[in-house]
Amino acid sequence: MNWKIEQAQHKFPELISATRIEPQLIYNQDQLVAAVIEAKTFQEFLAWQQQHRQHSLADAFAQLRQLCAEENYTLEIPTRADRLNPFIDNFRDISL
């Protein structure tokens, strides 16, 4: 069922009861602003979301740091060396 915000406020217990049948949509001036769903449905969604969550690169690095700490491993990072950059090298040759 669709509700206007004012209806939802005045008939809140009915709105909550109706979620057992189907999600309840709340509108403000013909624009959807909220959906009220049964708690069980929401918990199922959270479980699904957790299972399908894509890990970020930051998560991968955090996991790598954790593994390195557990194994007492130190990552050797070589010092940075500048490499050729044709764009910059050509730009330096141009006199303004």
Image (tube, grey):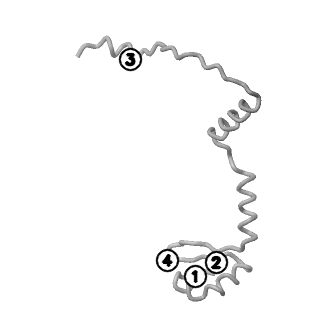
Say which amino acid is labelled 2. Gln
Counting other residues with Cα less than 10 Å from the Cα at mark 4, is it few (<14), some (14-19), or many (20 or more)? few
Q: CA distance from mark 3 to mark 2?
A: 60 Å
Residue type at mark 4 is Asn
Q: CA distance from mark 1 to mark 2?
A: 7 Å
Kindly identify which numbered label has been placed on residue 28: 4
Residue at the outermost left position: 96
CA distance for labels 1 and 4: 9 Å
Circle 1 SS class: strand
Which tag, 1 or 2, sits closer to the chain's start?
A: 1
Residue 73 in the image: above or below residue 61:
above
Left or right of 12 on screen, residue 22: right
In the image, is residue 73 above or below residue 39?
A: above
User: Residue at 61% across / 20% down in the picture?
Assistant: 77
Asked if 46 appears above or below 20 in the picture, the reply is: above
Front position in the image: 91 or 79: 79
- Circle 2 residue: 24
Q: Amino acid at mark 3?
A: Ile
Asked whether, in this view, residue 57 is left or right of residue 50, the answer is: left
Mark positioned earlier in the residue sequence (3 or 4): 4
Q: Position of residue 89 (x, y in %)?
A: 38, 13
Residue on which disc 3 sits: 88
* Residue that carries the numbered disc 1 in the rendered image: 3
Q: Regarding mark 4 in the picture, which secondary structure is present there?
A: strand
Going from N to C along the chain, the mark reached first, 1 or 4, is 1
Mark pair 4, 2: CA separation: 14 Å
Residue 33 position within the rendered picture, expressed as x and y whole percent measured from the top left:
53, 72
